[in-house]
Amino acid sequence: MTTQPAQPAQPAAPVATTRAPRRRVLRFAGHYLEMVVAMVVGMALLMPLTPAAWAALPAVHALVMAADMTIGMAVWMAVRRHRARLIVEMSAAMCAPFVLLLVPYGLGAVSGETLMIGGHVLMFLTMFGAMLLRRDEYAGC
């Protein structure tokens, strides 16, 4: 009878868990919500400083509102110690929809209300897109 040498025990394969991916998704979603809150705070704090006459001009009002929201979000991202590049990218993502909608507004193709509503809807989508492009940065914070 021959005996075979004992094989060293192989470590068990790690069990795949869904906790890590779920945690990343929750961090990502939480960060998105933090930025939305920061935008609302920025708008609430800065909009009262805007001259009332500007509210009568839809294009100016939309751009000032976008700037107020962007400032609030940028300050919060700086507090969270994001790199300047990310802050600039997110700021561009937030303002771009309003700037792009100025063209059809200027041509009379859309109303001031459409400019404002469309800019906000597109802003939330472009923010989400910017975050997806750098999901490791936003999910790991």
Image (cartoon, rainbow, N blue to C red):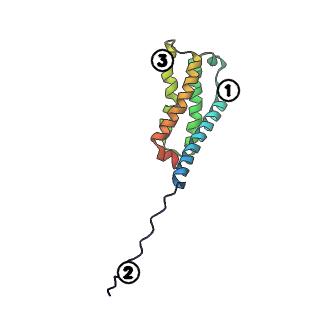
- For label 3, the SS is helix
Q: Residue at image x 55%, y 20%?
A: 115
Disc number for residue 86? none
Q: Is residue 22 above or below residue 92?
A: below
| Classed neighbour count for the residue bearing mark 2: other residues with Cα under 10 Å, few (<14), some (14–19), many (≥20) | few
Viewer-nearest of discs 2 and 1: 2
Circle 2: residue type:
Ala
Q: Are marks 1 and 3 in contact (CB under 8 Å)?
A: no
Disc number for residue 103? 3
Disc number for residue 6? 2
Circle 1: residue type:
Pro
Circle 3: residue type:
Val
Viewer-nearest of discs 3 and 2: 2
- For label 2, the SS is loop
Q: Is residue 98 visible?
A: yes
Quarter of the image holding residue 64?
Answer: top right
Label 3, label 2: how far apart the Cα atoms are: 77 Å
- For label 1, the SS is helix
